[in-house]
Amino acid sequence: MERNIFEAEHDDYRRSVRAFMEREVVPNYPDWEKAGIVPKSLFTGLADLGLNAAVPEEFGGAGIKDFRYNAIAIEEGAYAGVGPALLGPTLHSDICMPYLLELTTDEQKHRWLPKVASGEFVVAIAMTEPGAGSDLSGIRTKAVRDGDDYVVDGAKTFITNGINADLVILVVRTGEHPHRGLSLIVVEDGTPGFSRGRNLEKVGMHAQDTAELIFESCRVPIANLLGKEGEGFFGLTNNLPQERLNIAIGAIAGAQAALDQTMQYVRDRKAFGKPIGNLQTIKHRLALLVTEVEITQTYVDRCILALNAGTLSVEDAAKAKLWSTELQGRVVDACVQLHGGYGYMLEYPIARAYIDNRIQRIYGGTSEIMTEIIGRSLNLG
């Protein structure tokens, strides 16, 4: 079924993004995987392409809030087989940007947004701690007021863009209440007491930096508080639907890319003198997967339009993330199987997809947490 959510300007943008991927990303991707990080020039290059268009014109953006453009960038990264390289830039534009657009004062906007829009400032968000993951009430990093500063002590881990980041949106505890005791502050690169641990070695997603962040008597100006003190939890929950939709888009695009690669492989691979795609077991298995992916794409597309309209609920975003990422896991696993021994060789894109995409069911809220969110919405007592 043909997708119908895009218009002519989106198709033009897709062609530009695809050309950028082929020219700037695909040739360099192996080197970035070895380095464990993408260069900051990728952030500025994608900014020039319009990735940060949601920033108002007065601060260097285009003032366009249309998540269809964001979806195109995510999809094209997946189709080109370089999705991990796009994870940092799209976290910057899709997940961190709303905080800087919606919670900042005029002074903060003037201070940060121009370089965020241009990609010169890379942004990260630091929630997860060594002892606190999905349960935000478990956060222990503290920020204590001292004159015109907060004094921050604690540590964060698994932070995307942690090495590249110039600005870190930090979730801290400013009070004892599990939720109303959380606040958001922005820590700038070079702030005394802020240091980065190692770039963590992961199973997959090797081109994307993931770091530990350490705060030891780190003095952050009160002027860097995002929103009001004690309202950090509500800022986080307001932005979670967009974050989870970002992941769902990448998951279903990754599933489609795996299917495309596999269908070409079973056309080309011969057994008993015929393409293995002629075998009924293979044909039927792919038929089922293609059907699931197409149906899921339709739901994700509806979520994109709902986000644009401001009506995407926490529950619907959780459904999109849960189903898309679980489906991606099933699709990629099946595609590895259909490649046979070649599916286990890293020179084949499907093998890299197998190790890169496992994290989708964990970050942004695990599948178990998504199921709990959906279950709570059923009002079963």
Image: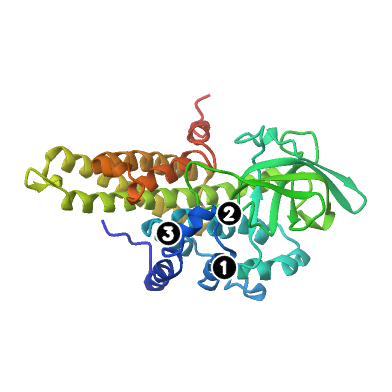
Name which of mark 1 and mark 3 comes first in the sequence.
Answer: 1
Give the Cα separation between the discs numbered 1 and 3.
16 Å
Q: Position of residue 92 (x, y in %)?
A: 59, 58
Mark 3 or 2, closer to the camera: 3
Mark 1 or 3, closer to the camera: 1
Q: Secondary structure at mark 2?
A: helix
Q: Position of residue 311 (x, y in %)?
A: 51, 52
Q: Secondary structure at mark 3?
A: helix
Q: Secondary structure at mark 1?
A: helix
Three-letter amino acid code of the residue under disc 3: Gly
The residue under label 3 is 77
The residue under label 2 is 95
The residue under label 1 is 41
Mark 2 or 1, closer to the camera: 1
Three-letter amino acid code of the residue under disc 1: Ser
The foreground one among 221 and 190 is: 190
The foreground one among 310 and 104 is: 104
Q: Quadrant of residue 178?
A: top right
Three-letter amino acid code of the residue under disc 2: Ile
Name which of mark 3 and mark 2 comes first in the sequence.
Answer: 3
- Above or below: residue 361 compared with residue 1: above
Name which of mark 2 and mark 1 comes first in the sequence.
Answer: 1
Q: Are marks 2 and 1 in contact (CB under 8 Å)?
A: no
